[in-house]
Structure formats: C-alpha cells, structure tokens
Amino acid sequence: MMGRRFRAGARAGSKRLTVLCTIATGTHQELFATARPSFERFAAFHGFDLVVVDRDLCASRPPSWSKVVLIRELLETYDRVVWVDSDAVIVHPIGDIFDGIGRRTHLRLVVHRYLDLEVPNLGVMAILSSRWSKRFFARLWSAEQYVEHKWWENAAALELLGYDVDLPQRSTRRRTMDARRVDELDLSWNSVPIDPSPSPRIRHFPGMAQADRLLEMRHAASEAAELPVPADQMRHSRIDEEIGKFGLALLEDVSARRHRRT
C-alpha cells in the first residue's frame, strides 16, 4: 500500500479545508504503527483529512526532504495543512493548532530553547495555503547546500528565518521577510525530550535510538486521550499512488528557473 487518506467531511469545490499529513518510511514505519491511532483520532476529531505516505517522494535526497514535496503538493489542494513527524504521538487532540493563523501569519511551529540555542522545529507545522507558503517551501527545496546537512530541510528553514544554521541563537538572528509570516506554536504542540512541555498535546521523539524511541512512543500512546469520535467522521478512502509527483515537479521547476537565472 502506497498510503491512505482517511477523509472526514471534505468541502465541495476545488479545495478541501484541512489535511493532516506525514510520511513513514524505513524504520519509521514501525514507529508510526504505534502513532497511527492517535493521528486517526486527531484527524477525525477535528474533521481533517489524513494523508499518510509510506515511500520516499524524492530518491535523490535524504528521506526527510520528502516532507517538502508532500506539503508543497497538498498546498495546491487544501486550504490548510498540518504536518506531524511520524515519530510523534498526538496524546491530547483538543485545541486549535491554527489559532493565530490569518492575514499576517501563514506558518506556525514550535521554537525550542535549550543550551543557549533557539531552534524552530519543522516536526510539527500548521500551514495556511498562500502564495507565500508555496514560495517558502520552494525556497526550502532550492537551498541545495543543506541537502546533506544533519538537520536537512530544517537547516534550510533556519537560514530563511534569519538564524545562524550551525549555532542558532536569538542574539545573532537576522530579520528576514520570511520570519514576518511565521509565528510560534505553544510548546505543547511539539514536546521533545530535550525541551519538554508540562502539558503536551504532541510528544515527539527525534534523534533517539530506535528501541528507545519505540519504547517511549508506546508509553505515550498508552496515555493518549481517548475521545469519542462520531462514526460518520471515520470514512476511509485510498490515496492516489501518484502522490508526490506533482509536488516534486513544482519544486524542480522552481529550482531549474533559479539555476537559469544564476
């Protein structure tokens, strides 16, 4: 199976309202097997579509970059996109992740502060489909100097948001046009071991050994809030096996035009 979409009350017309998405490949498939029920519950509770892809969408880059491909494609067909990494468990689905999204703010994410660092984390994002957001993810893709960086697309985001990529700190941050469109999510939306929230909505376990991460995710899943979901919001449908091709074509076209200009 290439992936599945769990649809919940999609709007008629050319665009649907909101989609929750993730990609689980390789060892992350085992992790996501634990997290999947929490994603399904969150999507159904809020009436979101859920798109899960279980293959890489760009063979020429590390798997993390497939996130950019999928999001860029979904921004064409949805008004709003929620991304959550597949090594995270949604433990408390109540709350509006889009609170604050609007005319000025088109992207919300958690900024972690630890060890004198300030690190925006693309592991959980709430994105408004707009000309700016489409261009932002295209610029991430075009930052080819970070393709093999240890933080991959997150390193590209640090640069676009004005940070020193190797030592991101508030004191050395530059003002950028992109930063004006980005706002912080509460820490509860992306609680990580090095910067935990006292009342997490999403518990995320990046950068851990597989066995340790799986153990922690199973523990988090056992504590996830059980909320009643109307039966008519749990409809299932197959996802198009061609997903990702359109997003990749959009990004590669932008990159090619940038190269021609230079």
Image (tube, rainbow, N blue to C red):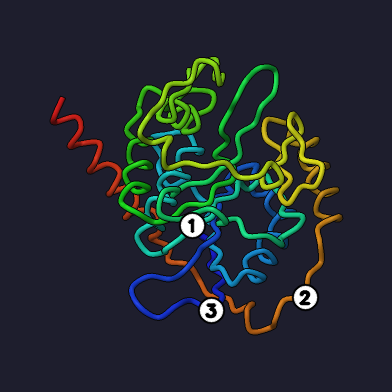
Residue at x 77%, y 40% (from the top left corner): 197
For the N terminus, the quadrant is bottom right
Residue at x 36%, y 36% (from the top left corner): 141
State the SS at label 2. loop
- As drawn, is 153 to the left or to the right of 199? left
Q: Looking at numbered disc 1 in the image, what kind of residue is underneath it?
A: Val
Residue 9: which numbered mark, if any?
3
- As drawn, is 120 to the left or to the right of 190? left
Residue 81: which numbered mark, if any?
1
Kindly check if marks 1 and 2 are in contact, taking CB atoms under 8 A apart as contact.
no
Kindly check if marks 2 and 3 are in contact, taking CB atoms under 8 A apart as contact.
no
Q: CA distance from mark 2 to mark 3?
A: 17 Å
Instruction: Kindly indicate the quadrant of the structure image that contains residue 76.
Output: bottom left
Residue 228: which numbered mark, if any?
2
* Residue 54 visible from this viewpoint: no
Q: Looking at numbered disc 2 in the image, what kind of residue is underneath it?
A: Pro
Residue 244: which numbered mark, if any?
none
Residue nearest the observer in this picture, 101 or 136: 101
* Number of numbered markers: 3
Q: Residue 132 at what x, y percent from top left?
A: 33, 47
- For label 2, count other residues whose C-alpha is less than 10 Å away and answer few (under 14), some (14-19) or many (20+): few
State the SS at label 1. strand
Question: Looking at the image, is 111 positioned above or below residue 171?
Answer: below
